Image: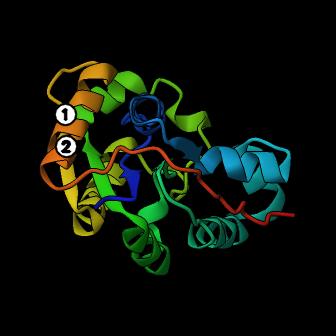
Amino acid sequence: MISNLILIGMPGSGKSTVGVLLAKRLAWRFTDTDVVMQVRAGAPLPVIQERVGMEEFRRLEDRCLCGLKGIRQVIATGGSAIYYPEAMAHLQTLGVVVFLDVPLDELHHRLSNFEDRGLVRAPGQTLKSLWRERRPLYRRYAQVTVSWRGEGHEQMADKIVNVLGRIGLDTSTASTKMESCGIS
């Protein structure tokens, strides 16, 4: 029985949008870890990074991911979640990790604001080099990969529900408890 869905993938892969659709269909809670971090810090991700530096930002993100608990929720992670092995191991214990695999050319189309998104990346790193670096990590940690083939977000949500239904998705409703990330 699947108790949570954890969505991983590149920025622009649709984790948040598809996650909300999945949560509505399943009557589960939706949690976007980027939003949780922003709410706790009272600032957008780029401002948090500027304020605390990239090394501390990464520690905060890792701590946020490791602190997630609960059942019957769809969790959309930041694209950099795969850089934290302990956090990914924790997420795998919470439920099924689903990689939304979107081709590079589509990500270029979707990410017109790549430079301004507050991504965890090396200075000057391109989308292409980031995609090449991260894709093997997404594949390593994913228990299920759902590839984008021109579908809309609704169709991607359908694909995920269909795949997970075959492996035991429990869609019954229940209360959800979620502990928040501690960011000061």
Residue ID at (65%, 58%): 178
Q: Which residue is mark 1?
A: 159
Picture colour scheme = rainbow
Determine whether the residue tagged by mark 2 lies in a helix, strand or loop. strand
Quadrant location of the C terminus? bottom right
Residue 69 vertical position relative to residue 148 in the rendered view, above or below? below
Q: Amino acid at mark 1?
A: Lys
Residue 155 vertical position relative to residue 114 in the rendered view, above or below? above
Residue 103 appears anywhere in the view: no
Q: Residue furthest bottom?
A: 86
Along the viewing direction, whichever of 114 and 12 lies nearer the viewer? 12
Residue ID at (28%, 61%): 1
In the picture, measured across the screen, residue 67 lies left or right of residue 96, that is: right
Q: Quadrant of residue 162?
A: top left
Residue ID at (58%, 66%): 69
Mark 1–mark 2 CB contact (< 8 Å): yes
Residue ID at (50%, 34%): 114
Please tell me the numbered disc located at residue 17: none
In the picture, measured across the screen, residue 130 lies left or right of residue 150, that is: right
Residue 154 vertical position relative to residue 2 in the rendered view, above or below? above
Residue 7 % position (x, y): 39, 49
How many circles with numbers are drawn on the protein? 2
Q: Residues within 10 Å of mark 2 (few under 14, many from 20)?
A: some
In the picture, measured across the screen, residue 138 lies left or right of residue 184, that is: left
Q: Residues within 10 Å of mark 1 (few under 14, many from 20)?
A: some
Determine whether the residue tagged by mark 1 lies in a helix, strand or loop. helix
Residue 80 % position (x, y): 48, 58
Q: Which residue is mark 2?
A: 146
Residue 78 % position (x, y): 51, 51
Along the viewing direction, whichever of 141 and 1 lies nearer the viewer? 1
